[in-house]
Image (tube, rainbow, N blue to C red):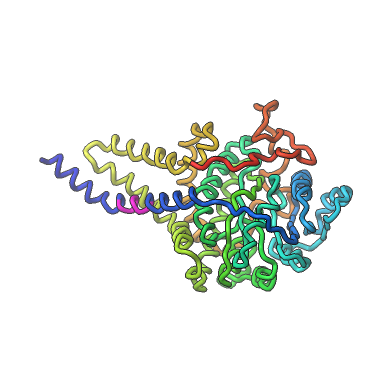
Amino acid sequence: MATLQAFADGALWLLPFGLLGIVSWGFWLTRKLLSATARPTRNDFRTTTTLVVPSFHEDPDVLIRCLHTWHRQGPGRIILVLDLADTEAQQRIEALALPGVHVEMFAHRGKRSALGHGMRMVDTELILFADSDTAWEDGMLDAIQMPFIDPAVGAVSTRQNVYLPRSSVWRRIADWIIDLRYYDYAPAMGRYGGIICASGRTSAYRTSVLLPQVEDLEHEMFFGRECIAGDDGRMTWLVLSQGFRVAHQDTARALSMFPGTFRAFVKQRIRWSRNSYRCYLTAIGKGWVFKVPFISQLTMMQILMTPFTMLVAIAYVLLSVRSASPWLALGLAVLWAVVGRGIRSISHLWRRPEDLVLLPLVAAVIAFIALPIKIYALFTMNKQGWLTRSADRQGGEGQTEASLVVPSVANETLDGALDEPVDPVPDGALGEPEAAPRA
């Protein structure tokens, strides 16, 4: 009888946490089903395009490798906004003499200033943005234009992955996390035109919708301070706030350099978390959030509540030791945390089954991101800075071309690309040209 009473007492303690888990899994399953049944837009719509690329002290080898992948797809014009100090990149790009490529030297006052400078030079129907370390897969430019056949579409987000993820365990983990975003989150929001952040790694906008908002992008203020990072979220919400749709195009694909070190990985996540808090709290404060579909509101609120839900999960684990067999209960709780992460990661594991060995590490890293990193970012959200780039370093921290060397697999191809990338990148070298099967 005493054992039954102890079990009942424990069950009462755990009941609210169990209910929260049911709600969380219900939201995940809803998004998963919506994403799994979403389909990319396919048509023959093409129009005039300009690509704007702000580049601040980028590794010239990375920039030129990516430039070849943009140029061979034929945008009407490519505007590279380089910092005044980036003379090596300027000379190497101009020596290529690629038609339609314009190098603009500009005194960067942050990425937003460079974006604004480039945007004011655009006279085409669509304006595309790409980060200086992001390469395009073949067919990207055609695919990203297709949703704009709908005049209600003001912006389009793209499917993205990590360039050569097996060159670092931290890139493999980043690729895992980003895969889940573009398998299980973005398509669900995109099918209703409610993408809440069209990643600046590559996205497209209707120029007539975005250009009038350029000063709101450049001079966004948050609690008395001008914002530096978070430009992509800001541009997305400037489009959504006007009642336009932000679509997602899964067949428009890009590959980005991600940090190859733990230190840079953490810095990047802190910056992204700060950007999310500022962006979404602004959307709530201005009432823009009420103009987006419910699935987008739900996703945004879940992102904002991540530290709380992770605290609840930890409380669930701690309360499990109140049972008659505390070590067994604790072991089962930890096991479920890992297995549950595996279930939620089925989309990525379907694409890369060899990553299953990383599951315990990924579960720990995601918990680390969800709790200490996000809590730290919450209380420092108004601290402005890029963290992984600085005036005294060429290339992002842990993101130079040299960081891609993988001695243990020197003769092995990675995702169809050579360990030592060459310029120009060969056709089909940047990954899977066809859509990977959804899980």
Would residue 235 be visible to someone looking at this image? no
Above or below, comparing residue 382 to residue 436 in the picture: below
Q: Position of residue 258 (x, y in %)?
A: 63, 45
- Point 44% across, 57% down: residue: 302
Residue 91 lies in magenta, yes or no?
no
Pinpoint residue 133: horizontal percent, then vertical percent: 70, 48
Q: Please, is residue 65 above or below residue 196 in the view? A: above
Could you tell me which quadrant the N terminus lies in? top left
Relative depth, front residue between 29 and 322: 29
Give the residue displayed 86% in from the left and 53% down from the top: 99
Q: Is residue 107 left or right of residue 29?
A: right
Query: Can the viewer see residue 390 in this picture?
Result: yes
Number of marks in the rendered image:
0
Q: Is residue 260 left or right of residue 78?
A: left
Q: Quadrant of residue 301?
A: bottom left
Name the residue at the left extreme.
1
Principal SS element in the magenta part?
helix
* Residue 6 or residue 416, whichever sits in front: 416
Q: Residue 308: x and y, percent?
A: 40, 56
On whether residue 22 falls in the magenta region, the answer is yes
- Residue 137 position (above or below residue 41): above
In the rendered image, residue 104, in percent from the top left (x then y), is placed at 82, 60
- What residue range appears in magenta? 19-24
Q: Nearer the viewer, residue 159 or 234?
A: 159
At x 48%, y 48%, the residue is 36
Q: Residue furthest front?
A: 44
Horizontal side of 386 relative to 356 (left or right) equals: right
Q: What residue is at 49 percent from the left and 43 percent from the top?
A: 365
Between residues 252 and 195, which one lies in front from this camera angle? Answer: 252
